[in-house]
Amino acid sequence: MDGGIESTGAYMGKAKIVIGLGAVIAAVVGATALGAWALYGESGHSYVVIDSGRVRPIEPRAGMAYEYNLDAYDDAGNRSLVTFQTSRELRAGAYLELETKPIRGVVAWEEVAYEDVPEQAREALSSHASS
C-alpha cells in the first residue's frame, strides 16, 4: 500500500511541473502575439490639417527635427489627438492622411487633396478649423 501512496505523490509532482511549463509557454506565446500586434497590427487612418501654431522644434533625432500635436479625425469623423515628428516644417493648411499602428502611433503620412479626405473627416476638420 505504501508504494501506491508514493507513486501518487510522484505523479502529482510531475503533473505540477507539466502544468507550470504549459503556463510559461502560454505566457510567452501570448506576449509574442501582443508584441507582433503592437508592431505590425492593423493600420488605422486619420486626417489632419497642418496648423503652424501647433508645431515645435525638437532636438534632432533619427532625422526628425519638428513635432506636431494636432487634432485628427478618422473616416467617421471621430476626433483624437495625434503627435508625430517630421524632418521639416510642413505647409500650413495642408491636409495629411496619417497611417497609425497600435502603440506605435503615427508611422507614415502623406499630403492629400481636400477632396480626397473622407466626407465625415472633412466636415469635422472644417468645423474644427472654424471654431
Image (spheres, rainbow, N blue to C red):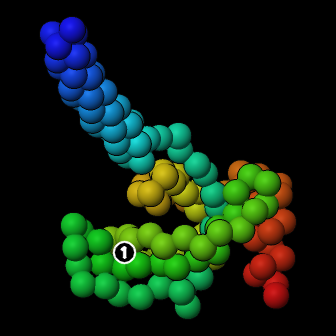
- 105 and 17: which is toward the camera: 17
- 10 and 79: which is toward the camera: 10
- SS state under label 1: loop
Residue situated furthest bottom in the rendering: 53
Residue 72 seen: yes
Q: Position of residue 72 (x, y in %)?
A: 64, 68
Q: Residue at x 61, y 51 (%)?
A: 45
Q: Position of residue 20 (x, y in %)?
A: 27, 32
Q: Residue at x 38, y 70 (%)?
A: 86
Q: Quadrant of the N terminus?
A: top left
What number of labels is visible? 1
To which quarter of the image does residue 51 belong? bottom right
Q: Residue at x 52, y 79 (%)?
A: 69
- 111 and 31: which is toward the camera: 31
Q: Quadrant of the C terminus?
A: bottom right
Q: Amino acid at mark 1?
A: Arg
Residue 122 seen: no
Q: Position of residue 53 (x, y in %)?
A: 55, 91
Going by the image, does 66 lie left or right of 129?
left
- The residue pinned by badge 1 equals 88
Crowd band around label 1 with a 10 angstrom C-alpha radius: few (<14), some (14–19), many (20+): few
Q: Residue at x 41, y 88 (%)?
A: 56
To which quarter of the image does residue 82 belong? bottom right
Q: Position of residue 74 (x, y in %)?
A: 70, 57
In this rendering, is residue 39 above or below 17?
Answer: below
